[in-house]
Amino acid sequence: MIFWRIVDNELHNVDNVERLGFEESEGLFIPDEHLEEQNFMVMRTAHGIGDWGIISAMPRLLKEKYPNCKVYIPSTRLLEKLFGEWRQNWGTWANPFENVQYIFANNPYVDGVKDYFLGEVFHDHYRTYDKNNKGIPLIKQMLKFWQFEEKEYEDYYPDLFFSQEEIEMGDEIISKYLGSDNFGGLLITNRFESNGGRYDEEGNRMIMNHLLEVCDDLPFFFWTYNTPQKISVKFNECFDMRNITTRLQLYIRTKAKVNIGNHCGFLDCVSRYSNVFQIQRTFPLNQNTIECENYVNKENLKEKLDVLKKSVFE
């Protein structure tokens, strides 16, 4: 892996490393001088929507620790300048560099969007990790590098903030199709299928159908990469979200009783607001996780089905 520095709007290749960040015994942290300036840029070097979603609490947490600080996010233009040659890495998005805006739009803790940032940007490669535990969420590792105490990032689950117009539009859609009834959210991406043996398609289908069966007649707002019939999953189809905006999809999912899917970053974004059940893709779990979520696999399936049943019917 390449460790990068971002200085004065330029990306620099520093070194090839086995693991990004700094082992906690090294005692390396963000410089005090940077903290004293209280002029912060929240930055990622990966640009899927979930990549940004899992660190979306950072502006709020920075403001809580440093009430007088200014917190900025990069513009689409800045991200294209820095990472444009790698945009195919996030090829499922027409423009992956817009995802930062989907996550931080209307965020009251963000002071502005920057096309340019002077000085050093301490991005997601700057993290403090435990060499014996790869499952510590990335935002915790980043904030530890930023000299946070553990108690200061206990509430690290993703934040989303919606405009009044988005709320009214989302509520209108929900009301039109369901009134005030409970509903679920379903998301099945192309990582559900085998992709040349990379993923356990049959195992995914078995687990998914068990999860959906527990939900009984719960209606689902859904997005699936292919028709439910072609991927052989059965559920109460209420509304196909394929033709509404990303922000409206996020809002509707925050109102769902549960969200179910194969392991993908989109559902990470709503884990503060809805009970999320994802079919585990990475073994063991790594830093791209949220601890309040339910990661379902063949070994814990029975246990997670009981949790899901309680989430739906209690």
Image (spheres, rainbow, N blue to C red):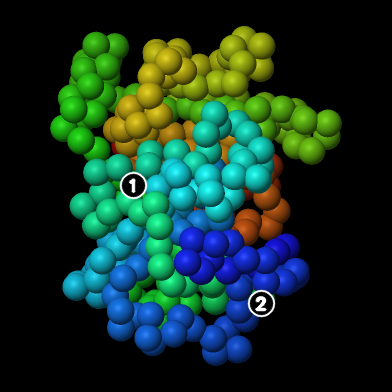
Q: Mark 1 highlights which residue? A: 104
Residue type beneath disc 1: Phe
Q: Residue at x 53, y 49 (%)?
A: 81
- Examine the image and state in which quarter residue 278 appears: top right
Q: Is residue 257 left or right of residue 291?
A: left
- Examine the image and state in which quarter residue 243 appears: top left
- Could you tell me if residue 240 is visible in this image? yes
Q: Secondary structure at mark 2?
A: loop
- Could you tell me if residue 310 is visible in this image? no
- Measured as percent of width and height from the top left, residue 191 is found at 67, 33
Q: Secondary structure at mark 1?
A: helix
- Measured as percent of width and height from the top left, residue 281 is found at 66, 44
Q: Is residue 76 left or right of residue 257?
A: right
Quadrant containing the C terminus in the rendered view: top left
- Label annotation for residue 244: none
Q: Residue at x 67, y 66 (%)?
A: 13
User: Callout 2 environment at 10 Å: few (<14), some (14 to 19), or many (20+)?
Assistant: few
Q: Mark 2 highlights which residue? A: 131
Relative depth, front residue between 28 and 155? 28
Residue type beneath disc 2: Lys
Above or below — where is 221 with respect to 129?
above
Q: Earlier in the sequence, mark 1 or mark 2?
A: 1
Relative depth, front residue between 59 and 241? 59
